[in-house]
Amino acid sequence: MAILLIVLIAIIVALYFFTRKIDSGIDDAFTPSGHITPVTGGTIHWQKQGHGPALILIHGLLGNARNFSELANELAPFFTVYRVDRPGSGFSSRHPKTEATFEQQSAMLLEWMEKEGIKEAALAGHSMGGGISLRMALDAPERITSISLLCPLTTPLTGGAGPLSMLYIPSDAIRRSVTHTIASPLRVKFGKKQMAQIFAPEAVPADFAVKGGGILALHSRSFYEGSRDTVSAQGSLHRQQGFYDKISCPVGVLYGDMDTILNPVTHTQAVTEKLPHALAKTLKGAGHMIPITQPQACAEFIRQLAEIDHNKNQAIG
């Protein structure tokens, strides 16, 4: 028994130092490339490019602002594009006692807007970023001009979200243990397979690991905060989904019709049943990661929503 215990301890120690090595390599390879703004409960890391009305891009689970590199380039001729790392993601921090609820993330992003002098903005949110975009429109309707939802998470899940289901760990003690031991080794071993599942049926771009920020998802902090996001999402969506009809700005939902991570019908209807005039479109043959695989189509959709808001304001004027 003593020998087994010693072996177990040795394995745990080895896993811990392997995780530290992976984290150190990522920290050496990636540094913040934008600005960092302190907000209540943490910091927001963000980048800015282009000219025109403000547009904020909000990424999904385990994502970061780099996910929008190509999409931001498509949009920059028409908007002042802000790419943000959500609280706890990328290079944005979240204090240990800061909640991961959509309400809290909305509050932190709205405070960032206030501090950076962004009086109003259109939002484009991917996956979980879509759910948080909806929360922001509920919390500050006077500041959000339109919402483009790209394969959004809009209603509580009744089943798993493919390989992302492993992030649902309600116990913080277990979450921390997994984070510091087996999470990184498993993701290094199975990462390519899991990434292919998330992108399916489309291919993972060759430059996604670096240019698209994919490697940042291997950091242990990303796993820990992603798990917190996953657990908090269910309650957050339960609290907000009944109020979507209160959103007054133009809203659109764009889904890949072959998305295997979130159900296109379920998450589109959660919006359109409350907002019958919401714009809903699908991309044939596309999967879940359309901001990366279909940047031109996403940019056209976002511009269409912005044009609806422009026409609405002209009619009011």
Image (cartoon, rainbow, N blue to C red):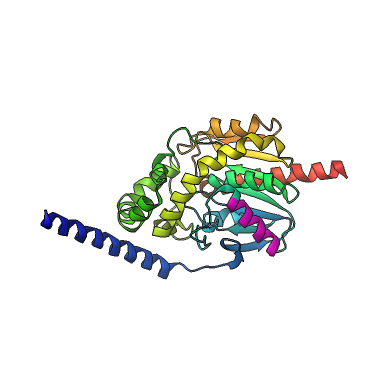
- Kindly indicate the quadrant of the structure image that contains residue 266: top right
Q: Is residue 317 magenta?
A: no
Could you say where residue 125 lies in the image, as x and y percent from the top left?
59, 47
**Quadrant location, the C terminus:** top right
Pick whichever, 246 or 57, lies toward us.
246
- Is residue 12 shown left or right of residue 195? left
Q: Which residue is drawn at 67% across and 44% down?
A: 147
Q: Can residue 50 be seen in this view?
A: yes
- What secondary structure predominates along the stretch shown in magenta? helix
Could you say where residue 282 lies in the image, as x and y percent from the top left?
58, 35
Q: Which residue is drawn at 32% across and 61% down?
A: 19
Against 66, is 193 above or below? above
Q: Which residue is drawn at 63% across and 43% down?
A: 134
- Is residue 87 shown left or right of residue 6? right
- Kindly indicate the quadrant of the structure image that contains residue 12: bottom left
Pick whichever, 36 or 26, lies toward us.
36
Could you say where residue 227 lies in the image, as x and y percent from the top left?
44, 49
Residue reaching furthest to the right: 317
Magenta span of residues:
104-115
Could you say where residue 181 lies in the image, as x and y percent from the top left?
30, 57
Q: Is residue 151 visible?
A: no
- Number of marks: 0
Q: Residue at x 57, y 48 (%)?
A: 102
